[in-house]
Image: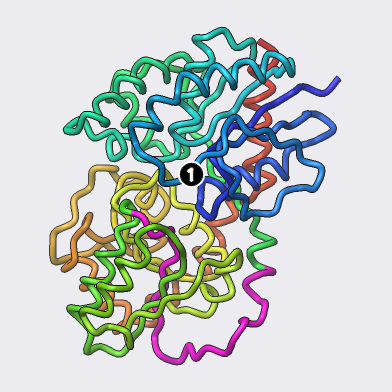
């Protein structure tokens, strides 16, 4: 008899964690599992199988008030517990911080299922203890994350961050499942409109929100605007218009080009010369793996967490990079955290050393194989089965 599994997340909107959920839902063995997808928002921008069961515990607005989000948590946890118990769910996998809190609360309210939570962000960035909302969220974190039967972060750095908060649990790092074949096929499709990639092209694909730190990219470009390159920015989000306004105010429209969000950024990534990640915080950035699949060399800010583990495996997570320097790592270039001068230095180096940059293409493709979707989903399945047997 198939085991009933719920995957709980906020939405399937256009971001990395949501893409990971879509990949996992589509790939898990349906002869083995009866999979229920539980969402909190109706936004669905990734393809899922047409017969996939979807249940909504709410249909919220993505940018609703922060305190309202907190106030609703106990009610949503009760609704989620009721749904799971009525459906006789055997195991829950929650993905992202609010779903994780809801799943932990549901465990304390008497959910019958085993509960696993997947932390996919650098926890201290999200839980700012200097604000009232941050203090409340930190208390919720410390209270309800330990209720889960296991925590499955996607990076060792996130494990260490949670352990620094004294979160006692059974931990297992599970990679991001990446559909390498699909990305490769999509990357070869013709562009929807002609675009000249003869100028050296940096590219960034990210939702326009605070932690993606697009301001750093604009500031870096402004300081080296006389060099021969351009930067493509692909995405959507509530900070898109402010970033566009900043580009206009600095008169950088000829250097920074905006493209609308697309389910297929890979056709642009495969034609660009270098990807840039500028984030203030991540869990483990899917887009870096996807860049490797596309044969796209990478410059990444050494933010917490993920970029160092991917690009410089075996190095210490607390390695420091000087403000005016960058690190030529095994699988890409790392720059100092949130440093304009470090990022500018790395961009100059990329422009001046195309041969060195080109050497990363095949190494990246080989490295991306570690994250191939069937391999990683098999890892999830092994973990699921171990808890289903308990």
Look at the picture and state if 125 lies above or below 388: below
Residue at 62%, 42% (x, y): give it.
376
Please indicate whether residue 145 sits to the left or right of residue 80 in the image: left
Please indicate whether residue 328 sits to the left or right of residue 146 in the image: left
Find residue 37 and report its horizontal and vertical position in percent.
67, 35
Residue extending farthest left: 323
Residue at 45%, 92% (x, y): give it.
198
Q: Quadrant of residue 35?
A: top right
Look at the picture and state if 191 lies above or below 185: below
Q: Main secondary structure of the magenta part?
A: loop
Look at the picture and state if 209 lies above or below 31: below
Residue neighbourhood size for the residue with mark 1, other residues' Cα within 10 Å, grouped as few (<14), some (14–19), many (≥20): few
- Residue bounds of the magenta highlight: 185-209
* Foreground pick, 69 / 126: 69
Rendered-image quadrant of the C terminus: top right
Find residue 168 and report its horizontal and vertical position in percent.
38, 15
* Foreground pick, 278 / 41: 41
Number of marks in picture: 1
Find residue 69 and report its horizontal and vertical position in percent.
40, 32
Colouring scheme, one of rainbow, by chain, secondary structure, one colour: rainbow
* Foreground pick, 234 / 154: 234
Rendered-image quadrant of the N terminus: top right
Task: Indicate yes or no whether the magenta region holds residue 135.
Answer: no
Secondary element type, mark 1: loop
Residue at 46%, 58% (x, y): give it.
288
Look at the picture and state if 235 lies above or below 156: below
Q: Quadrant of residue 163?
A: top left
Find residue 95 and report its horizontal and vertical position in percent.
52, 35
Q: Please name the residue that numbered disc 1 is placed on.
A: 61
Task: Indicate yes or no whether the magenta region holds residue 202.
Answer: yes
Q: Quadrant of residue 21?
A: top right
């Amino acid at each position: 008899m198939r085991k009933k599994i719920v995957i709980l997340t906020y939405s399937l909107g256009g971001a990395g964690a949501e893409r990971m959920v879509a990949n996992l839902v589509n790939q898990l063995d349906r002869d083995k599992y009866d999979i229920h997808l539980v969402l909190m928002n109706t936004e669905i921008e990734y393809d899922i199988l047409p017969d996939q069961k979807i249940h909504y515990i709410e249909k919220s607005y993505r940018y609703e008030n922060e305190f309202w989000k907190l106030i609703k948590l106990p009610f949503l946890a009760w609704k989620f517990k009721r749904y799971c118990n009525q459906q006789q769910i055997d195991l829950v996998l929650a993905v992202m911080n609010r779903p994780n809190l809801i799943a932990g609360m549901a465990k304390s309210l008497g959910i019958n299922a085993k509960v696993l939570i997947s932390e996919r962000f650098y926890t201290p960035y999200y839980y700012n203890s200097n604000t009232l909302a941050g203090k409340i969220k930190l208390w919720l974190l410390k209270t309800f994350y330990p209720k889960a039967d296991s925590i499955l972060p996607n990076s060792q750095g996130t494990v260490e961050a949670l352990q620094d908060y004294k979160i006692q649990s059974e931990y297992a790092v599970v990679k991001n499942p990446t559909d390498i074949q699909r990305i490769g096929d999509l990357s070869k499709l013709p562009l929807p409109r002609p675009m000249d990639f003869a100028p050296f092209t940096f590219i960034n694909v990210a939702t326009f929100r605070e932690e993606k730190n697009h301001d750093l990219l604009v500031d870096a470009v402004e300081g080296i605007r006389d060099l021969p390159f351009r930067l493509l920015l692909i995405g959507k989000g509530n900070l898109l218009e402010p970033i566009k306004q900043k580009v206009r105010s600095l008169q950088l429209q000829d250097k920074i080009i905006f493209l609308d969000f697309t389910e297929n950024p890979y056709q642009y990534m495969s034609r660009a010369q270098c990807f840039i990640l500028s984030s203030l915080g991540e869990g483990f950035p899917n887009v870096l793996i996807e860049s490797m699949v596309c044969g796209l060399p990478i410059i990444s800010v050494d933010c917490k967490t993920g970029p160092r583990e991917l690009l410089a495996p075996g190095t210490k997570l607390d390695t420091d990079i000087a403000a005016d320097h960058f690190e030529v790592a095994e699988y890409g270039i790392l720059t100092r955290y949130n440093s304009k001068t470090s990022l500018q230095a790395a961009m100059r180096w990329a422009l001046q050393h195309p041969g060195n940059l080109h050497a990363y293409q095949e190494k990246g493709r080989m490295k991306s194989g570690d994250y191939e979707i069937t391999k990683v989903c098999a890892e999830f399945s092994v973990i699921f089965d171990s808890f289903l047997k308990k």
